[in-house]
Image (cartoon, rainbow, N blue to C red):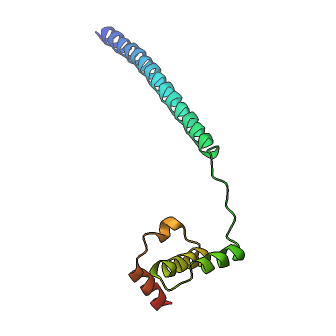
Amino acid sequence: MIRTYSINFNERIKNFFCIGRKKIYHIQLLLNKVDLKKKKEREEKAARKKAWSNRKRFPKRDPISSEIYNLLMKESEGPSYIGTRTRIALCLLTVTGIRIGELLPLKVGQLETLLEQG
């Protein structure tokens, strides 16, 4: 009886290790698939980064010269609302450096608040 028990126990251990080896093999296969997927993602990310760094860009623009500024201010002289608005816009663009897209949504009330606060 003791011998039968030890044979059954030995068979159980052999089966356990055989099943364990199969599981380890499958786990290794899964890990290899995950590694390949991560490697592919890293390569795609590097390709996107390279494409972004090689993107087409607009050339840098030269800042406005004082001659052009004075000419524009002279052309917008006059008591009309449009002339005054143009002079204020030119002053804001040159002094603060904001972009036209940031200037367009400004309202008169916001400019008055800006002047009052100093």
Looking at the image, residue 98 lies above or below residue 57: below
The picture places residue 116, in percent across and down from the top left corner, at: 45, 91
Looking at the image, residue 81 lies above or below residue 8: below
Q: Residue at x 55, y 71 (%)?
A: 98
Displayed quadrant of residue 51: top right
The picture places residue 68, in percent across and down from the top left corner, at: 68, 73
Looking at the image, residue 60 lies above or below residue 84: above
Q: Residue at x 66, y 76 (%)?
A: 71
The picture places residue 55, in percent across and down from the top left corner, at: 61, 44
Q: Residue at x 59, y 44 (%)?
A: 52
20 and 99: which one is in front? 99
Given the current orientation, which residue lies at the most extreme left position? 1
Looking at the image, residue 18 lies above or below residue 89: above
Q: Is residue 9 left or right of residue 94?
A: left
Q: Is residue 102 left or right of residue 4?
A: right
93 and 24: which one is in front? 93
Displayed quadrant of residue 16: top left
- Image quadrant in which the N terminus is located: top left
The picture places residue 48, in percent across and down from the top left corner, at: 56, 40
Q: How many marks?
A: 0
Q: Residue at x 42, y 17 (%)?
A: 22
99 and 108: which one is in front? 108
